[in-house]
């Protein structure tokens, strides 16, 4: 792949859509550094003794939570290195990045989250509970980001590429992204909605 070396690829999307897995593959294929605010957020929730939904609700009234999480973007845009950034808001804070939104059916996403041993702050008893909390968390985050930044995460026109991961492997998704990044860098057309 012929990707310009200072490229920033920002990955956002539905909870459980495979953002972390796809980001890791992109880093392997490009040699870019990986930044994950989801990992930072889960670690912060664990430190606070909360699950991620409770921490998101607390962030509605405690601006220090978002400031701590969002602070990592301050200098990334100026850094000459290439990055893959797995984050809800990186597309907004890094407007010159190649912005990717990953979509997944909520029940498939819930199954992925339940079966992911690294998500200690997101443990659910049933798929139904996971679906309910995933939808509540998404609603909480979207409302907060719209109110706080004027950033509409639900508007797919904000993204260079939208990919459904429901029936695709992380490797297949990464390949779609890399081809689109390369096409955009070369000024060639590519399919924006996959």
Image (tube, grey):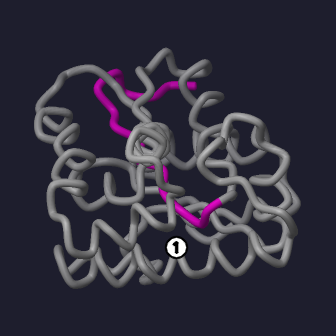
Left or right: residue 14 compared with residue 142: right
Per the rendered image, the range of residues in magenta is 1-15
Residue at the image point whose x is 29% and y is 26% from the top = 6
- Judging depth in this view, the residue of 29 and 49 nearest the camera is 49
Query: Residue 110's x, y, as percent?
Result: 78, 64
Task: For residue 95, say whether it is visible.
Answer: no
Quarter where residue 21 is shown: top right
Residue that lies at the very extreme toward the top in this rendered image = 31
34 shown above or below 183: above
Local secondary structure at mark 1: helix
Residue at the image point whose x is 22% and y is 49% from the top = 70
39 shown above or below 193: above
Left or right: residue 127 compared with residue 28: right
Residue pointed to by mark 1: 137
Image quarter (top left, top right, bottom left or bottom right) of the C terminus: bottom right
Quarter where residue 71 is shown: top left
Residue 14 included in the magenta stretch of the image: yes
């Amino acid at each position: 792949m012929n990707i310009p070396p200072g490229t920033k690829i920002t990955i956002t999307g539905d909870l459980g859509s495979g953002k972390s897995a796809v980001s890791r593959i992109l880093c392997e294929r490009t040699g870019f550094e990986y930044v994950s605010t989801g990992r930072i957020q889960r670690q912060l929730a664990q430190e606070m003794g909360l699950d991620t939904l409770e921490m998101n609700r607390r962030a509605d009234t405690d601006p220090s939570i978002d400031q701590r999480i969002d602070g990592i973007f301050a200098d990334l845009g100026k850094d000459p290195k290439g990055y893959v950034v797995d984050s809800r808001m990186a597309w907004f804070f890094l407007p010159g990045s190649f912005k990717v939104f990953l979509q997944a059916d909520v029940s498939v996403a819930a199954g992925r989250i339940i079966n992911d041993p690294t998500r200690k702050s997101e443990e659910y008893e049933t798929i139904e509970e996971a679906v309910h909390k995933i939808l509540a968390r998404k609603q909480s985050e979207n409302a907060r980001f719209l109110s706080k930044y004027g950033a509409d995460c639900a508007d797919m026109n904000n993204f260079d590429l939208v990919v459904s991961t429901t029936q695709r492997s992380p490797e297949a998704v990464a390949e779609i992204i890399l081809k689109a990044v390369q096409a955009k860098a070369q000024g060639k057309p590519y399919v924006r909605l996959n």
